[in-house]
Amino acid sequence: MVEPIFDAADFGVLSGEPKAFDQVSAGSGKIVHVHFCADCGTKLWLSFERFPDAVGIYAGTFDDPCWFEIEAATAKHIFLGAARLDTVIPAGLPTYVEHATTNDGTPQSATVFETCHQMGRG
């Protein structure tokens, strides 16, 4: 899933009234609020107890899901420990087995693959 993260202050709903359900993150134990369309059920964005100033928008909901750059300075792949074995990770991006930080905010060490990497192939 591609989920660009934005400052919550820069985010707003233009129309409609999405609903939300809360889910406890297995990784952090904190609540993740999943916001979705009340009519069709499409997941739209996430907000986080752990990161109250951020929202993660499901990229597939953008009219053009390719409008934002995916580059090492602004992107990371998290929760590779739960990734499907056929997941392909591009070269040069920081990756993490779980989250990029611990619950207390301590940064985790990233792994960066020099070539394209498929999860099930060591």
Image (cartoon, rainbow, N blue to C red):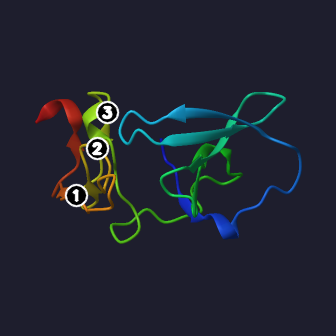
Residue at image location 32% in from the left, 49% down from the top = 99
Residue highlighted by disc 2: 98
Disc 2 versus disc 3: nearer the observer: 2
Q: Is residue 16 above or below residue 68?
A: above
The three-letter code of the residue at mark 2 reads: Glu
Alpha carbon separation for disc pair 2 and 1: 9 Å
The three-letter code of the residue at mark 1 reads: Gln
Q: Residue furthest left?
A: 122
Q: Is residue 82 left or right of residue 109?
A: right
Using the image as rendered, state which of residue 119 and residue 24 is in the foreground.
Answer: 24
Residue highlighted by disc 3: 83
Which quarter of the figure has residue 13?
A: bottom right
Q: Quadrant of the C terminus?
A: top left
State the SS at label 2: loop
Residue highlighted by disc 1: 108
Q: Position of residue 5 (x, y in %)?
A: 53, 59
The three-letter code of the residue at mark 3 reads: Ala
